[in-house]
Image: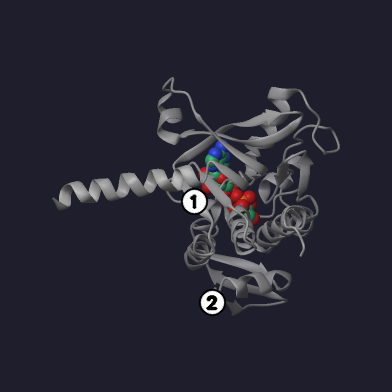
Amino acid sequence: MIETQVSRGIIATYFEKLEKNLELDVAIVGGGPSGMVAAYYLAKAGLKVAQFDRKLAPGGGMWGGAMMFNQIIIQEEAMDIVKDFEINYQAYKEGLYVMDSVESTAAIIYKAVHAGATIFNCYSVEDVIFKNNAVNGVVVNWTPVLRQGLHVDPLNILAKIVIDGTGHDSEIAATVARKNGVKLDTETGSVIGERSMDVKEGEDEVVNQTKEIYPGLYVCGMAASAVSGTPRMGPIFGGMLMSGKKVAEEIIARLTVKP
Ligand code: 48F
Protein backbone atom coordinates (compact mmCIF):
# COMPACT_ATOMS: atom_id res chain seq x y z
CA MET A 1 0.00 0.00 0.00
CA ILE A 2 1.27 3.49 -0.88
CA GLU A 3 0.48 4.70 2.66
CA THR A 4 2.97 2.23 4.13
CA GLN A 5 5.56 2.88 1.43
CA VAL A 6 5.49 6.62 2.10
CA SER A 7 6.22 6.00 5.78
CA ARG A 8 8.72 3.21 5.15
CA GLY A 9 10.59 5.26 2.53
CA ILE A 10 11.04 8.15 4.90
CA ILE A 11 11.98 6.10 7.94
CA ALA A 12 14.39 3.75 6.14
CA THR A 13 16.28 6.47 4.26
CA TYR A 14 16.33 8.88 7.21
CA PHE A 15 17.98 6.35 9.49
CA GLU A 16 20.41 5.39 6.74
CA LYS A 17 21.35 9.08 6.46
CA LEU A 18 21.73 9.43 10.23
CA GLU A 19 23.84 6.29 10.50
CA LYS A 20 26.15 7.43 7.69
CA ASN A 21 26.82 10.60 9.66
CA LEU A 22 27.74 9.09 13.02
CA GLU A 23 31.46 9.56 12.28
CA LEU A 24 32.35 12.78 10.54
CA ASP A 25 35.35 14.71 9.39
CA VAL A 26 33.64 17.94 10.42
CA ALA A 27 30.54 18.63 12.52
CA ILE A 28 29.25 22.18 12.13
CA VAL A 29 27.04 23.53 14.89
CA GLY A 30 24.70 26.20 13.56
CA GLY A 31 23.34 26.72 10.08
CA GLY A 32 23.88 30.47 9.85
CA PRO A 33 25.61 31.99 6.83
CA SER A 34 29.17 31.43 8.09
CA GLY A 35 28.58 27.77 8.98
CA MET A 36 26.72 27.13 5.72
CA VAL A 37 29.50 28.62 3.62
CA ALA A 38 32.00 26.47 5.52
CA ALA A 39 29.83 23.39 4.87
CA TYR A 40 29.83 24.09 1.14
CA TYR A 41 33.62 24.43 0.75
CA LEU A 42 34.33 21.48 3.07
CA ALA A 43 31.92 19.19 1.22
CA LYS A 44 33.24 20.38 -2.14
CA ALA A 45 36.73 19.35 -1.00
CA GLY A 46 35.42 15.83 -0.40
CA LEU A 47 35.22 15.93 3.40
CA LYS A 48 32.37 14.28 5.25
CA VAL A 49 30.49 17.14 6.83
CA ALA A 50 27.19 17.48 8.63
CA GLN A 51 25.55 20.57 9.99
CA PHE A 52 23.19 20.71 12.95
CA ASP A 53 20.72 23.53 13.46
CA ARG A 54 18.19 23.72 16.24
CA LYS A 55 15.62 25.48 14.10
CA LEU A 56 13.25 24.04 11.53
CA ALA A 57 14.78 26.25 8.83
CA PRO A 58 18.55 26.66 8.79
CA GLY A 59 19.89 29.98 7.55
CA GLY A 60 20.27 31.74 10.91
CA GLY A 61 20.04 35.51 10.86
CA MET A 62 20.27 36.07 7.13
CA TRP A 63 16.66 35.53 6.00
CA GLY A 64 15.38 38.79 7.46
CA GLY A 65 18.01 41.27 6.16
CA ALA A 66 17.83 44.20 8.56
CA MET A 67 14.70 44.89 10.58
CA MET A 68 12.90 42.52 8.19
CA PHE A 69 13.81 44.69 5.16
CA ASN A 70 14.93 41.63 3.23
CA GLN A 71 18.07 42.95 1.56
CA ILE A 72 21.69 42.40 2.63
CA ILE A 73 24.90 44.29 1.91
CA ILE A 74 28.16 42.64 0.88
CA GLN A 75 31.47 44.35 0.27
CA GLU A 76 33.80 43.87 -2.70
CA GLU A 77 36.23 41.52 -0.90
CA ALA A 78 33.56 38.84 -0.50
CA MET A 79 32.13 39.00 -4.01
CA ASP A 80 34.08 35.95 -5.23
CA ILE A 81 32.11 33.92 -2.66
CA VAL A 82 28.80 35.44 -3.82
CA LYS A 83 29.73 34.36 -7.34
CA ASP A 84 30.54 30.81 -6.18
CA PHE A 85 26.98 30.62 -4.85
CA GLU A 86 25.51 32.16 -8.04
CA ILE A 87 23.54 34.77 -6.08
CA ASN A 88 22.16 37.71 -8.08
CA TYR A 89 23.52 41.07 -6.97
CA GLN A 90 23.36 44.74 -7.72
CA ALA A 91 26.24 47.20 -7.34
CA TYR A 92 25.38 49.96 -4.89
CA LYS A 93 28.08 52.46 -3.81
CA GLU A 94 31.70 52.56 -2.65
CA GLY A 95 32.48 48.89 -3.23
CA LEU A 96 29.21 47.71 -1.68
CA TYR A 97 26.70 45.36 -3.31
CA VAL A 98 23.10 44.50 -2.39
CA MET A 99 21.35 41.16 -2.60
CA ASP A 100 17.96 39.71 -1.75
CA SER A 101 18.38 38.08 1.66
CA VAL A 102 15.93 35.25 0.95
CA GLU A 103 17.60 34.34 -2.34
CA SER A 104 21.05 34.55 -0.68
CA THR A 105 20.12 32.31 2.24
CA ALA A 106 18.34 29.78 0.03
CA ALA A 107 21.29 29.67 -2.41
CA ILE A 108 23.82 29.01 0.35
CA ILE A 109 21.70 26.22 1.84
CA TYR A 110 21.04 24.65 -1.56
CA LYS A 111 24.68 24.75 -2.66
CA ALA A 112 25.95 23.31 0.64
CA VAL A 113 23.60 20.33 0.45
CA HIS A 114 24.17 19.88 -3.27
CA ALA A 115 27.95 19.79 -2.68
CA GLY A 116 27.44 16.86 -0.28
CA ALA A 117 26.94 18.36 3.19
CA THR A 118 24.11 16.84 5.23
CA ILE A 119 21.90 19.14 7.26
CA PHE A 120 20.12 17.90 10.36
CA ASN A 121 17.52 20.50 11.25
CA CYS A 122 15.64 20.51 14.56
CA TYR A 123 18.81 19.12 16.20
CA SER A 124 20.28 21.01 19.14
CA VAL A 125 23.87 20.41 20.10
CA GLU A 126 23.76 20.32 23.88
CA ASP A 127 27.36 19.28 24.57
CA VAL A 128 30.57 18.00 22.96
CA ILE A 129 32.46 14.74 23.21
CA PHE A 130 35.57 15.68 25.19
CA LYS A 131 38.47 13.22 25.49
CA ASN A 132 42.24 13.54 25.87
CA ASN A 133 41.92 17.31 26.22
CA ALA A 134 40.35 17.72 22.81
CA VAL A 135 36.91 18.10 21.31
CA ASN A 136 36.01 14.89 19.48
CA GLY A 137 32.41 15.36 18.39
CA VAL A 138 28.96 16.62 19.32
CA VAL A 139 26.15 15.49 21.59
CA VAL A 140 22.76 16.04 19.98
CA ASN A 141 19.14 15.99 20.99
CA TRP A 142 15.85 16.95 19.38
CA THR A 143 15.13 20.63 19.84
CA PRO A 144 11.54 19.90 21.00
CA VAL A 145 12.89 17.59 23.72
CA LEU A 146 15.06 20.41 25.09
CA ARG A 147 12.35 23.06 24.68
CA GLN A 148 9.86 20.91 26.57
CA GLY A 149 12.44 20.19 29.27
CA LEU A 150 11.94 16.44 28.83
CA HIS A 151 14.45 14.25 30.60
CA VAL A 152 15.65 12.30 27.56
CA ASP A 153 19.28 11.40 26.94
CA PRO A 154 21.04 12.55 23.76
CA LEU A 155 23.01 10.75 21.03
CA ASN A 156 26.72 11.15 20.20
CA ILE A 157 28.30 11.97 16.86
CA LEU A 158 32.06 11.69 16.48
CA ALA A 159 33.94 14.30 14.45
CA LYS A 160 37.61 15.01 13.84
CA ILE A 161 36.80 18.71 14.00
CA VAL A 162 33.85 20.64 15.43
CA ILE A 163 33.02 24.16 14.24
CA ASP A 164 31.12 26.49 16.54
CA GLY A 165 28.97 28.55 14.17
CA THR A 166 26.25 29.20 16.73
CA GLY A 167 26.27 32.99 16.32
CA HIS A 168 26.07 35.62 19.04
CA ASP A 169 25.96 33.17 21.97
CA SER A 170 28.98 31.07 20.92
CA GLU A 171 27.31 28.23 22.78
CA ILE A 172 29.76 25.46 22.05
CA ALA A 173 32.86 27.45 23.01
CA ALA A 174 31.13 28.54 26.22
CA THR A 175 30.11 24.96 27.03
CA VAL A 176 33.62 23.58 26.43
CA ALA A 177 35.20 26.21 28.70
CA ARG A 178 32.56 25.96 31.43
CA LYS A 179 32.21 22.19 31.66
CA ASN A 180 35.85 21.23 31.34
CA GLY A 181 37.60 24.09 33.11
CA VAL A 182 39.92 24.65 30.15
CA LYS A 183 41.36 27.81 28.65
CA LEU A 184 40.38 28.83 25.12
CA ASP A 185 42.74 30.63 22.74
CA THR A 186 41.40 34.11 23.60
CA GLU A 187 42.90 37.04 25.50
CA THR A 188 41.26 35.95 28.76
CA GLY A 189 41.15 32.21 28.15
CA SER A 190 37.36 32.28 28.18
CA VAL A 191 34.47 33.63 26.06
CA ILE A 192 34.82 37.42 26.22
CA GLY A 193 31.46 38.37 24.65
CA GLU A 194 30.79 40.54 21.59
CA ARG A 195 31.22 44.31 21.70
CA SER A 196 28.76 46.93 20.45
CA MET A 197 28.43 47.82 16.78
CA ASP A 198 31.42 48.91 14.71
CA VAL A 199 30.96 47.82 11.12
CA LYS A 200 34.55 48.16 9.85
CA GLU A 201 36.30 46.69 12.88
CA GLY A 202 33.62 44.01 13.26
CA GLU A 203 34.00 42.90 9.65
CA ASP A 204 37.81 42.79 9.83
CA GLU A 205 37.90 41.02 13.17
CA VAL A 206 35.32 38.34 12.45
CA VAL A 207 37.68 37.02 9.80
CA ASN A 208 40.86 37.53 11.88
CA GLN A 209 39.34 35.72 14.87
CA THR A 210 38.16 32.72 12.85
CA LYS A 211 40.47 29.98 14.11
CA GLU A 212 40.96 26.92 16.26
CA ILE A 213 40.29 28.06 19.83
CA TYR A 214 40.79 24.70 21.52
CA PRO A 215 42.13 21.40 20.13
CA GLY A 216 39.44 20.10 17.77
CA LEU A 217 37.22 23.21 18.11
CA TYR A 218 37.11 26.06 15.57
CA VAL A 219 34.89 29.16 15.64
CA CYS A 220 33.44 31.09 12.72
CA GLY A 221 30.98 33.93 12.16
CA MET A 222 29.48 35.81 15.09
CA ALA A 223 30.68 33.04 17.41
CA ALA A 224 34.26 34.08 16.51
CA SER A 225 33.43 37.72 17.32
CA ALA A 226 31.73 36.77 20.58
CA VAL A 227 34.52 34.50 21.74
CA SER A 228 37.20 37.09 21.05
CA GLY A 229 35.33 40.18 22.29
CA THR A 230 35.24 42.01 18.96
CA PRO A 231 32.37 44.21 17.69
CA ARG A 232 29.14 43.18 16.00
CA MET A 233 28.63 44.52 12.49
CA GLY A 234 24.93 44.24 11.63
CA PRO A 235 23.45 43.42 8.23
CA ILE A 236 26.66 43.48 6.20
CA PHE A 237 27.44 39.82 5.49
CA GLY A 238 30.80 39.78 3.69
CA GLY A 239 32.63 39.01 6.94
CA MET A 240 30.32 36.05 7.62
CA LEU A 241 30.97 34.57 4.18
CA MET A 242 34.74 35.15 4.39
CA SER A 243 34.85 33.67 7.88
CA GLY A 244 33.06 30.54 6.64
CA LYS A 245 35.46 30.20 3.72
CA LYS A 246 38.50 30.76 5.94
CA VAL A 247 37.52 28.11 8.49
CA ALA A 248 36.88 25.65 5.65
CA GLU A 249 40.26 26.36 4.06
CA GLU A 250 42.12 25.86 7.36
CA ILE A 251 40.38 22.56 8.00
CA ILE A 252 40.81 21.35 4.43
CA ALA A 253 44.55 22.06 4.69
CA ARG A 254 44.67 20.07 7.91
CA LEU A 255 42.55 17.07 6.96
CA THR A 256 43.25 16.63 3.29
CA VAL A 257 46.24 14.54 2.39
CA LYS A 258 48.09 16.02 -0.56
CA PRO A 259 48.92 13.47 -3.31
O1 48F B 1 23.53 33.68 14.14
P1 48F B 1 23.66 32.98 12.84
O2 48F B 1 23.02 33.57 11.65
O3 48F B 1 25.22 32.65 12.58
P2 48F B 1 26.41 33.41 11.83
O4 48F B 1 26.83 32.57 10.70
O5 48F B 1 25.76 34.71 11.19
C1 48F B 1 25.47 35.86 11.95
C2 48F B 1 24.51 36.72 11.16
O6 48F B 1 23.33 36.03 10.85
C3 48F B 1 24.11 38.02 11.84
C4 48F B 1 25.18 39.02 11.88
C5 48F B 1 25.85 39.28 10.55
O7 48F B 1 26.36 40.40 10.37
O8 48F B 1 25.46 39.59 12.88
O9 48F B 1 23.63 37.74 13.16
O10 48F B 1 27.40 33.79 12.84
O11 48F B 1 23.10 31.51 13.00
C6 48F B 1 23.46 30.67 14.04
C7 48F B 1 22.61 29.42 13.93
O12 48F B 1 23.04 28.50 14.93
C8 48F B 1 21.91 27.82 15.43
C9 48F B 1 20.78 28.83 15.41
O13 48F B 1 19.53 28.18 15.33
C10 48F B 1 21.11 29.64 14.15
O14 48F B 1 20.41 29.16 13.02
N1 48F B 1 22.29 27.35 16.78
C11 48F B 1 22.69 28.11 17.83
N2 48F B 1 23.02 27.33 18.86
C12 48F B 1 22.81 26.04 18.47
C13 48F B 1 22.35 26.06 17.13
C14 48F B 1 22.97 24.76 19.10
N3 48F B 1 23.41 24.63 20.34
N4 48F B 1 22.66 23.66 18.38
C15 48F B 1 22.20 23.75 17.11
N5 48F B 1 22.05 24.94 16.48
Instruction: Report the disc number at residue 88.
Output: 2
Q: Quote the CA–CA distance across marks 2 and 1.
A: 24 Å
Q: Which residue is outermost to the bottom?
A: 91
Helix, strand or loop for disc 1: strand
Which sits in the foreground, 124 or 254?
Answer: 254
Can residue 229 be seen from the camera position used here? no
Residue occupying image coordinates x 39% and y 43%: 15
Which is nearer the eye, 248 or 167?
248
Residue nearest the viewer, comparing 128 with 85 = 128
State the residue position of label 1: 119
Residue with the most extreme top position: 151
**Nearer the camera: disc 2 or disc 1:** 1
Q: Are marks 2 and 1 in contact (CB under 8 Å)?
A: no
The answer to whether residue 43 is visible is yes
Residue lying at 68% horizontally and 29% vertically, measured from the top left: 130
Q: Position of residue 217 (x, y in %)?
A: 72, 41
In x, y percent, where is residue 116? 53, 60
Find out if the beta carbon at label 2 lies less than 8 Å from the nearest ligand 1 atom: no
Q: Position of residue 64 (x, y in %)?
A: 50, 57
Please tell me whether residue 145 is drawn above or below residue 63 in the rendered image.
above
Q: Quadrant of residue 18?
A: top left
Residue 226, compared with residue 84, is above or below; it is above
Instruction: Determine whether the beta carbon of the residue marked 1 sits less than 8 angstroms from the nearest atom of ligand 1.
Output: no
Q: Residue furthest front?
A: 259
